[in-house]
Image (tube, rainbow, N blue to C red):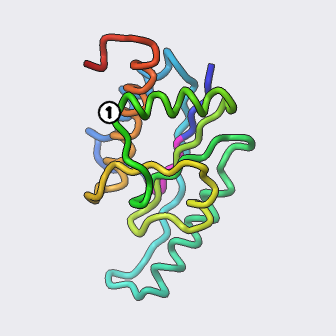
Amino acid sequence: MINVTVIAVGKLKESYLRDGCSEYIKRLGAFAKVNVVEIAEERASDNPSQSEINNVIQKEGERIISKIPKGAAVIPLCIEGKEYLSPDFSRLIENISMNSSHLCFIIGGSFGLSDSVKSAGKYKLSFGKMTLPHQLARMVLLEQIYRAFSISNHSKYHK
């Protein structure tokens, strides 16, 4: 069974997001062992300078990198990542799984990911040019991973 780790900056604050993520993690249990690692969100002032933003990104990046499982295929979510149709994302996961038994998806905080985190991934994923709150992005990611496994296993979920 493949391992899937989602490293995410911040905690889920809304109950509907916690419930949605829990549901997809439960469903994914049929296909993979899923682990969500929450990284503490670095605090910033209400109107941060670019220097303060860079500092936040660097500190969160260091925390993220320390939690990446050894040997995992790293897939950061970032605006410059590639957009996939769900069947193509399913094939990507299948292809990566041929060489690695551990997938590690990374969701940054409100200022994004450090260059060192982005460069840790051979593949980068984007949900499009629109900005999503990082807590919502976690639920969308889990749903899409579940959909990808469902497609690979020919289940009725993906229509």
Whether residue 9 appears in magenta in the rendering, the answer is yes
Q: Which residue is at 42% across, 27% downward?
A: 148
> In the image, is residue 34 above or below residue 56?
above
The residue identified by callout 1 is: 19
Q: Quadrant of residue 2?
A: top right
**Residue 11 on image: x %, y %:** 43, 51
In this rendering, the answer to whether 91 lies above or below 9 is: above
Taking the image as shown, residue 96 lies to the left or right of residue 14, namely right
Q: Nearer the viewer, residue 19 or 34?
A: 34
Using the rendered view, name the quadrant where residue 61 is placed.
Answer: bottom right
Quadrant for the C terminus in the image: top left
Residue 87: percent from the left, percent from the top? 38, 28
- Residue beneath the point at 51% across and 79% down: 54
* Magenta-drawn stretch, dominant element (helix, strand or loop): strand
Part of the protein shown in magenta: 6-10
Q: Is residue 43 left or right of residue 129?
A: right
Residue at figure coordinates x 31%, y 47% from the top left: 136
Asked whether 76 falls inside the magenta stretch, the response is: no
Viewer-nearest residue: 116 or 83: 83
In the displayed structure image, the side of residue 82 where residue 127 appears, left or right: left
Percent position (x, y) of residue 115? 57, 68
Look at the numbered disc 1 and give the secondary structure of its residue: helix
Q: Amino acid at mark 1?
A: Asp
Quadrant the N terminus occupies: top right
